[in-house]
Amino acid sequence: MINKGEITTYKMEQISKLGIEKFLSSEFNLIYFKCSNLQYHSNGKISKIIFTQLEN
């Protein structure tokens, strides 16, 4: 995630360990993001998603 030019990466394991409910109920549900980059594996599945925080 990009916030004011600073990139923060969250691994799926981090989200899973915290629990998706806690992750979604944290401050992230108060911030709006847009998908700014989407990359695919050669098999057509998504390999990387980059979100950019929108200004409130």
Image: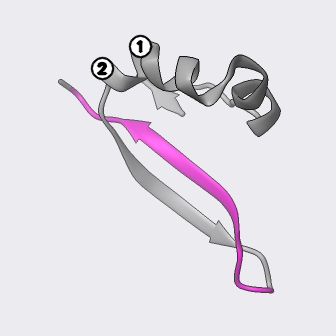
What amino acid is labelled 2 in the image? Leu
Image position, residue 38 (x, y; %): 56, 64
* Quadrant (top left, top right, bottom left, bottom right) of the N terminus: top right
Is 54 on the left-hand or right-hand side of 53?
A: left
Q: Which residue is mark 1?
A: 27
Q: Are marks 2 and 1 in contact (CB under 8 Å)?
A: yes
x and y percentages locating residue 49 in the rendered image: 59, 54
Q: Is residue 45 above or below residue 42?
A: above
Asked whether, in this view, residue 52 is left or right of residue 16, the answer is left
Q: Is residue 45 magenta?
A: yes
Across and down, in percent, residue 24 comes to 48, 26
Farthest bottom residue in view: 43
Q: Name the residue beneath numbered marker 2.
A: 30
- With respect to residue 12, does 5 lie above or below? above
Magenta residues, start to end: 43-55
Element type where label 2 sits in the image: helix
Amino acid type at mark 1: Glu
